[in-house]
Image: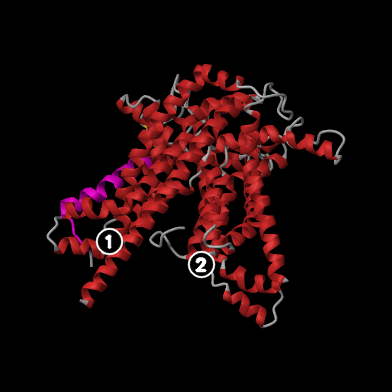
């Protein structure tokens, strides 16, 4: 009786919260196909908002800029996060370790307004002293990378911590040089996490409004900045169309990533089981 | 101990790259922020004056930027300023959001953790999916949902709950719905990571010993998941204090939060010292709960987060 009640209440609660989580997404998908600007009544199917989206040069320009920014941010963040995670996990003692670990984690808890403001002050100061950098794409990338690196670091760090270090020792025993160990053993082992860090940094960058608002220069507007500008003005189904395309893309990417992870995990397990069987056979023989 | 040791120059390089990066792009900007918060406001071209006055040969340290947060002018009553209001409001919204996320997210995470192991990855993926789609767009959707002519009002009117539209947009309702919606996964994920490791036989033991379900939950499950509750609470509370986008889209003039005030001081009033002083106080407000958190949980920067 108790279990039954819990089971039903559990299902009910899960359904309710999932409905809450997906209601806005569903709403945008449905109304992106609406034939009028109405935001509560579906007046008929049409693709006019998709047409408007493709003809909106501000959105298209913003999209390409955001894509460039996010790709660069993703790569830079993944590289820097790998460095930082490696340092934190492998070097227990060095001068200023506490400061280092504080600085890596701090962007995770700093409001974006403060990150944006303080970086703006740095760039303005540098511009006064060196005449460089001009505010624009470059400064936005630097700002996003600060955030992306911190998030990526968390992902890679936990993978590095659970990695079996005896395989590195085995490689060393077999005569591999330290850089060979890193590139042939360590890196393939944490590759999944590095890819996750890239995706995370890419998404953060592609989605960010606040840091971009602080760090962008004249004529440089990322997609979220364009959308933010539209959004403050009122209802615009063109944005729903953009959202629908984004939801579709994200769903495909995330689901394929999850399937890929599940598959490679299974493959690894199968290989390990096969190796164990062979070992047993060898012992028996 | 170490499986492989890099040579000293190699080690220096590996540590040096991220160190230098963080020093230049995190530490230095923060020092500049702190510096400007102590100087005088300047002109349009030079928004702040130098701390060291070369001509007079004196240090011009200004505390006024901080004092004016608490008292606008001499003789005015303390703590009755727009800034204090914005701070109090920001903390209030952050607390309310964290509590709402906890009430909604705890049972949610609990039932995911108790579901069959085969469906758990799919359920978690379903929690993560909205989280990966644009935060901005999801907030924007609520603008359409909660508006006077929005879907929810229309639904209420059709059902007969109300005869005319209820104003929800640009009020506390839309602010809290938007913030809870956005930050719910931040509460659910650490709670889930904690609850999934729990040994549910402990609950059975409590039942066998005569505990009611509520008592067992309150005396066994909740204390065991304390770390997850605190982590989720912090992950929601901290970013909420500085939230900028949600009040801009879903809040009205009466829902002004401190992030927006900093922005206005910086770009509308062009008062850089005031903006930076407000930012420094905001950091202090966030560091205090964070320090308490680390004090009670211990530094887990090496322990791997969920």
Contact between labelled residues 1 and 2, with CB atoms less than 8 Å apart? no
Q: Secondary structure at mark 2?
A: loop
**In which image quadrant can residue A3 be found?**
bottom right
The residue located at (27%, 63%) in the rendering is A165
**A87 or B70: which is nearer to us?**
A87
Chain on which label 1 sits: A
**In which image quadrant can residue A126 be found?**
top left
Q: Which residues are magenta?
A: B3-26
Is residue A226 something that shows in the picture?
yes
**A255 or B277: which is nearer to us?**
A255
Left or right: B246, with A205 as reference point: right
At label 1, counting other C-alpha atoms closer than 10 Å, the crowd grade (few under 14, some 14-19, many 20 or more) is few
| Up-down relation of residue A84 to residue B295 (above or below) | above
The C terminus of chain A lies in which quarter of the figure? bottom left
**A150 or B51: which is nearer to us?**
A150
Return the residue at label 1: A93
Q: Position of residue A189 (x, y in %)?
A: 30, 54
Coloring applied to the structure:
secondary structure
At label 2, counting other C-alpha atoms closer than 10 Å, the crowd grade (few under 14, some 14-19, many 20 or more) is few
Is residue B44 something that shows in the picture?
no
Q: Position of residue B178 (x, y in %)?
A: 64, 41
Return the residue at label 2: B197
Q: Position of residue B163 (x, y in %)?
A: 87, 35
């Amino acid at each position: 009786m108790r279990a039954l009640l819990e089971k039903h209440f559990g299902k009910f609660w899960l359904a309710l919260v999932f409905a809450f989580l997906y209601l806005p997404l569903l709403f945008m998908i449905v109304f992106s196909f609406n034939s009028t600007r109405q935001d509560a009544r579906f007046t008929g199917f049409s693709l006019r908002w998709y047409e408007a989206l493709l003809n909106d040069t501000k959105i298209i320009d913003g999209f390409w800029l955001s894509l460039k920014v996010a790709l660069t941010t993703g790569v830079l963040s993944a590289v820097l996060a790998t460095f930082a995670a490696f340092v934190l996990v492998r070097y227990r003692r060095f001068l200023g370790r506490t400061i280092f670990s504080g600085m890596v984690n701090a962007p995770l808890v700093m409001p974006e307004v403060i990150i944006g403001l303080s970086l703006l002050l740095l760039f303005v100061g540098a511009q006064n002293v060196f005449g460089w950098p001009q505010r624009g794409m470059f400064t936005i990338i630097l700002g996003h990378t600060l955030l992306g690196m911190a998030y990526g670091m968390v992902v890679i760090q936990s993978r590095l911590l659970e990695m079996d270090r005896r395989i590195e020792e085995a490689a060393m025993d077999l005569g591999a040089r330290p850089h060979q160990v890193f590139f042939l053993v360590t890196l393939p082992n944490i590759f999944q996490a590095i890819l996750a860090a890239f995706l995370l940094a890419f998404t953060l960058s592609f989605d960010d409004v606040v840091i971009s608002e602080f760090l962008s220069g004249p004529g440089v507007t990322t997609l979220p900045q364009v959308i933010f500008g539209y959004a403050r003005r009122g209802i615009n189904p063109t944005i729903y169309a953009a959202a629908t395309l984004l939801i579709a893309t994200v769903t495909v990417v995330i689901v394929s990533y999850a399937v890929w992870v599940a598959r490679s995990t299974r493959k690894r397990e199968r290989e390990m089981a096969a190796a164990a069987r062979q070992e047993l056979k060898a012992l028996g023989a | 101990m170490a499986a492989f040791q890099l040579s000293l120059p190699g080690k220096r390089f590996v540590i040096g790259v991220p160190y230098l990066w963080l020093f230049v792009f995190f530490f230095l900007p923060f020092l500049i922020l702190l510096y400007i918060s102590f100087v005088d406001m300047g002109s349009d071209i030079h928004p702040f004056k130098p701390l060291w006055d070369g001509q007079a040969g004196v240090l011009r340290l200004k505390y006024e930027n901080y004092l004016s947060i608490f008292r606008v002018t001499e003789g005015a009553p303390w703590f009755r300023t727009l800034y204090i209001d914005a701070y109090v409001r920001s903390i209030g919204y952050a607390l309310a959001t964290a509590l709402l996320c906890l009430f909604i997210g705890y049972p949610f995470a609990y039932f995911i953790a108790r579901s069959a192991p085969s469906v758990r990855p799919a359920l978690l993926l379903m929690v993560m999916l909205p989280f990966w789609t644009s935060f901005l767009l999801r907030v924007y959707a609520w603008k359409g949902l909660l508006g006077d002519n929005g879907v929810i009002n229309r639904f209420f009117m059709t059902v007969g709950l109300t005869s005319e539209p209820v104003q929800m947009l640009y009020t506390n309702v839309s602010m809290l719905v938007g913030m809870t919606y956005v930050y719910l996964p931040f509460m659910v994920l650490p709670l889930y990571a904690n609850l999934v490791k729990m040994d549910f036989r402990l609950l059975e033991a409590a039942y066998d010993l005569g505990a009611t379900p509520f008592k067992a939950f309150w005396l066994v499950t909740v204390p065991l998941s304390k770390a997850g509750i605190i982590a989720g609470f912090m992950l929601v509370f901290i970013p909420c204090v500085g939230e900028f986008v949600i009040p801009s889209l879903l809040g009205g003039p009466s829902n002004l939060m401190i992030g927006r005030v900093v922005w206005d001081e910086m770009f509308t009033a062009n008062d850089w010292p005031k903006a930076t002083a407000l930012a420094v106080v905001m950091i202090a407000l966030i560091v205090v709960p964070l320090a308490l958190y680390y004090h009670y949980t211990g530094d887990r920067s090496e322990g791997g987060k969920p």
